[in-house]
Amino acid sequence: MKGYFQVKTEDSGNIIDSLHPLELKILFVFQAGKTVDDNVLVTEASIEQSQKDMAIGWLLAKDVLSVDSEVVEKTVTLTETGERYADSKIPELRIFQSIKDNPGYSMADVKGRGDIEPTEISSAIGILKDKGIIRVVPGGKLEIGDESLLSEFEGVQRLVNAVKDKAEIRLSDLPENEQTVIEGLHRKRGKTKGVFRINEKVIRTYSLTELGGKIHPAVLQRGRPVDEISQLTPQMLKDGSWGGKSFRKYNITLPPPRITPGRKHPYKEFLDNVKYKLVAMGFEEMRGGLVENEFWNMDALYMPQFHPARDIHDVYYVKEPRLSKDIEDPFQVKVSETHQSGGETGSRGWKYLFDADKARRLMLRSQGTAVSARTLAGNPKIPGKYFSIARCFRYEQVDATHAQDFFQIEGIVLGEDINFRTLLGLLELFALEVAKAKEMEFFPAYFPFTEPSVELHVRHPRLGWMELGGAGIFRPEVTIPLGVNVPVIAWGLGLDRMAMVALDIHDIRDIFSADLDMIRTKRVQWV
Amino acid sequence: MPTISIKKKDLETLIGLQFSLNDLERHLQLVKGELKGYVAETDEMRVELSDSNRPDLWCCEGIARQIKGKLTGAWKDYEFFYSDGTNKIGQIVVSEDIRDIRPYVGGFAATGIPVDEEMLVQMIQTQEKISEVFGSKRRRISIGIYNLAKIKFPVYYKAVRPEDISFAPLGFDEKMNLQDIVERHPKGETYGEILRGMAKYPILIDSKDNVLSFPPIINSREVGEVKVGDTELFVEVTGIDIRLVLLILNVLAVNLHDRGANINIAEVLYPYETEFGKTICIPNDFTEPLPLPLKDIDKVIGEGIDIEEVITLLDSYGHWVKRAGDELQVTPPPYRDDIMHPVDLCEDIAISRGYSSFNPVMPSQMTVGVLSDAEVFADQIREYIIGSGFQEIISNILTSKEDVLYKMGLEQEKVVEVDNIMSQSYSALRQWLIPSLLRVETASSESFYPHKIFEMGEAAVSDETSNLASRTVIKCAAMMSHPAANFSEIHSILETLMYYLQMDYRLVPGEHPSFIGGRMGWIYTGKDVVGLIGEVHPKALTAWEIHMPCSAFEVDVDKLLEIYQANP
C-alpha cells in the first residue's frame, strides 16, 4: 500500500494506470467544470455507498478530486416498525378493513387478533375513534363512521411504501405536508414506536482538481470500466465467473515489499564453490581437529623445534592440559630420528636433540598442513589427491589484514609421477580453473616442509597480477617417516583476496561480520 | 621472514653492474626475494627474503653475491677459510664453567677497510636480523662487533657471578654489574629472560681485564662501540649450537670480505669436546660434500638435464661440484648450512636455470573426487534450514569464556583456553554455537525483523579421555528473534529438519541457565542427547545487551550423523 501512494503527481500516465475500477467509475460521473455531490455519485456511478466512500478517499489523497462544499442533509428511512407496515399496512387501515369486512366485529375480536401488537391496537382504535372514522356501539361492537376521513391514513401508507421503494428519501424532495407527516411519525407516538427515521448527513460536493482535469479526458477515452477483476479468486476459477471480464491493470513499476530470504553466507558460498571445484578436479576431502599437538602441526612437517615460527609469539598454545597423552607409534621415533640425524630419509637431519615433551605440547592448529600430515600417516591412497578447508589460528595482532582465525585451503597429491614439472602442471590447473587466469608465473619460494617450493602468481581477469598460492614437493624427511614412499605435492591456495574483492570488503574481519544487515544485503559475483 | 632495507646503489656497487628496477625484481628470484618498495629520493629498496634457512641472503652483500655469481660467473675464493695460520689474530680461551650456560663462541678480525656510513648501517641491520629471527631473539646465537684496536688477546670466554664484574654497557656512562644490567638496562629487560635461573652469566673479557661484552645482552661501551672511520674490527658470535655459531661467523666474514676487508682468523680453545674438536679456527668451512646421483635430479625435476648443464647450474649458484661418472659430489659454500638432502640441490638447479624454463606437465593419474560424509551431511542440513528461511552466519571460533560461558549463565563447563593470551577477546575456543548467533543479534538490532539466522561450524569440546584432551565437533545452531519469538516456532524448524533427516527425536524438559525454565528441552534420539532447544533466558539476553526475544536450538551434527548412519 505504501508504494501506492508514492506515485508522483506529475506523472499522469502512471496515475491512470494505478486507478482502481471504483475510482474510474466515479471519475466517469464528472464533467469538466461541473461539480458532483455524494448522492449523485452513488446513483450515477452505480456503486455502493461504502465503495464510494473508499474510492473518494483515494482520489482525494491523490489530489485528483477536491471538496467544493459541504451541506447537512436530512433523509428519511424506515424504522423496523415502518418496514413491517410497508409489508402489511399500518394498523389503522387493517383494523378499519376488518370492521368493514366483518359486521358485528367487536372490541374483543380486535384485541384477540394476534397480528397486531396490543399497544398498537389500543393506539389505532383510539385514533380512529377520535377522528370519527369508527364508533363503538353498545355491546362492544364496532361500526364504520366517516369513511372519507380515512384518506389521511391511506396517505401515510403511501408514504411508507414510497420510502420502502427507494430505501432512503431526501426530506427536502417531499411536499411539505408529507414532510409534516413524517416529522410527526418519526418520534415515538404514545407507546408505539416510530415509523420513519430522519437521518442527518453531510453531503459533499466535489470537482476535478487541476491534476484531475488533466487526466479526466484520458479516463473517459478508456471507456467505462465494466466489472474488472482485481484479484482472481479460487471461486472465480471454480464457477468460471472470470470469463468475459477483464483484469485490472497493475502499475507493475512500483517497488515490491521487502522480504528476507533464507540464504547461504556469501563467504561460505565462496568456499562451497571452491570445494565443489576441487572435488571436480578429483580431490578427496580430509578433515582434522582445531586443537593439535606440535608433533602433527610442526615436527611431522620437519620444522625443527627451534624454528622461528614455533614461538609463543607465533602460535597459540593450550593452557590446560599442556601436553597430549602420547604420540602415535611409530611416528614419534621415526620423526625424531629424522630431525636428529635424517633417519632413513637420506638426509643429514637438523642435528639437534629432539624434545619429545615439546612434541606433545598442545596448541591451536596454525596451518592446514597439519591435516595433510595426519592424512599421510593414515595410509593414504596412491595415487591420491586430497584437500581440506581448515580453520587455523595465529598469534597475530588483529587488524584489517589479520584475523585471529581464518580458513586455509590446501592439500596434497601423491603419486609416482609427481615431480617439479607435474607440480607446475597442477598449479597451472589451479590458475586456469580457480582464477580463470591464462597468464601465470612461477617463483622460487620457501616453505619449511617442501623442496623444491614454488609460488604461483596469476593474472586474474579482474584483479590483475596476484599471488594465488604456494606449493612444493614434500621433503623426503616429511613423507618417509610417515610411511609414504612416493613423492607428494603439498599445495595451498590463498583465495581470500579474490573472495574479498568478490564480496567488496576491505577488512578481513568483515568476513566473520556480526552485522546481519551487511550479511543479508551482500551481493557477490563469483564467475 | 625478514624484510631488509638496502640501497640500490650499494647493491649495484657490490655486484659491479647496474640494473633497472624491473631487472632487479627478476634477479631477486635467485634469492627468493620480493621487492616490497623502492624510494627514489633515498635510493632505498625494501626486500623481503623468504628463505628462513639462508641467513646469508638477509643482507645486501648476500643478495649481491648470489646475483653476481649467476650473472658473471665470478665467485670469490675466500681463501681465509683455508689459512695456514700466518694471519692469526689471537686466541679465544673458553672456560669449563660456561659449558652449561652458553657453551660456544667464535670470532675473527676484519682489517684494512675504513668503516663507512652505509657499511655500518648494513652491518647493524644484518646483526639484528640474524640474531632476532635466525637466532630466536638472541637465545640461539648473538653477535658482537668491536673495535679491534682496543682488545688485547687472548680473549677469555667464561662464566662469572653476576655481582663479581662491573663495566659500563653501551648507552650508559656508569659501571654496572651484570645483575644491574639485566634489571636496569633496556637490553637486559628484553633479553634477560635467556639467562633466567642461571647462577653465573657469560662474559667476554680480554687479557687486560677489559670487558668486551656480556653475551647475549650488551657490549661494553669502551670496546664494543664501532664508529664510522674505524679500520679494524673484531667480530664474535656466541650461542648454544656450534653449527649456527660457525655458520653465522662465516656469513659475517664473507660479507666483510666482499666489502674489501682482510679477514684474520682467531683460534678458539675449548676445555671440552665439540662436534668440531677442541681447537677450532674461525672462520671455519665445516661444510661437507654431498653425493648427487643424476637420476635423483631427473626424478625430482621430471626431465633429464645434461650433466654438464647441471654442473654449470650448480657452479653458477655458488656450489663446488666434482664429477665422478654419473654421480656428482657437491660441496655447498661455507656460508650455507641448508643443504641437508639432494632435493635441496635439485631446487638450486631449478632456481639457477629459472622456473620459467620448465614446461608444466599435468599429473595424469586418475583419482576420484569426493567430500567427506560429515560435509555432505552438514550441507544437507544447511539446505533444509536455508529452505526454512534462515540466513547463514559464519563466526570466529576463537572467542572468550565471557561469551561462551559467563554471558550464557554458565560457570563450570570446561573449555579449551589459550595459554599465551594476546587479548581476552580471543582466549578460548567455543564449545557451542548459540553464543555466536547472539553475538550477531547484539550487533543487528537495527536490521529488519524478524531475524532468522543459523550457523553450521566447528567447536572444540573438552574431553579428558581423548589424546588431545578435546574433540572437534561440527555443530549447527539456529535462532529466531523478533517481538513474538517463542519456543513453538523454533520447535517447528527442528521438527521439519528431523522429519527430512528421517530421524525420530523427542524433547525432554530440562533446566539450563541459558534458557527460560519450563521452556527448555534436551533433544534426544534414542538414548542419546543430540542437542538442546529453548527460549533464551532474559538474563542471557541482558548480558548480551539484546532487547528482543530469542528462541534457538543447537544440535551436534557429528552425533546425528553417527546415529543417521547406524540406522539405515
Image (cartoon, grey):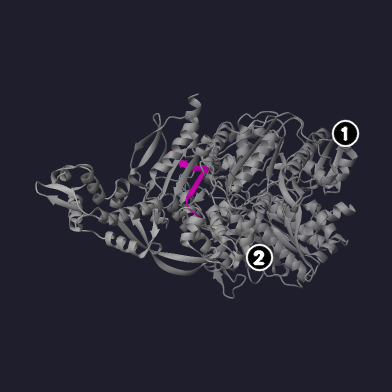
Comparing labels 1 and 2, the label whose residue is closer to the camera: 1
- Is residue B242 visible to us here? yes
Q: Name the image quarter holding residue A372.
A: top right
User: In which quadrant will I find the N terminus of chain B?
Assistant: bottom right
Q: Residue furthest left?
A: A139
Q: Residue furthest top?
A: B568
The reply to whether discs 1 and 2 touch (Cβ–Cβ < 8 Å) is no
Q: Residue furthest bottom?
A: B173
Q: In the image, are marks 1 and 2 on the same chain?
A: yes
What mark, if any, has residue B325 been given in the picture?
1
Q: Which residue is mark 2?
A: B207
Q: Is residue A333 above or below residue B17?
A: above
Q: Position of residue A427 (x, y in %)?
A: 75, 41
The amino acid beneath tag 2 is: Ser
Could you tell whether A444 is left or right of A343 in the image?
Answer: right
Dot placed on the residue nearer the N-terminal end, 1 or 2: 2
Helix, strand, or loop for circle 1? loop
Could you tell whether B254 is left or right of A496 in the image?
Answer: right
Viewer-proximal residue among A190 and A60: A190
Q: Is residue B449 shown in magenta?
A: yes
The amino acid beneath tag 1 is: Gly
For the point 45% across and 38% down, the residue is B494
Q: Chain of mark 1?
A: B
Viewer-proximal residue among B9 and B202: B9
Category of crowding for the residue at label 1, using alpha-carbon neighbours closer than 10 angstroms: few (below 14), some (14–19), many (at least 20): few
From mark 1 to mark 2, how far is it between C-alphas? 54 Å
Viewer-proximal residue among A494 and B249: A494
Q: Position of residue B33 (x, y in %)?
A: 76, 54
Q: Position of residue A490 (x, y in %)?
A: 69, 39
Q: Which residues are magenta?
A: B443-465
Q: Is residue A342 shown in magenta?
A: no
What mark, if any, has residue A73 been given in the picture?
none
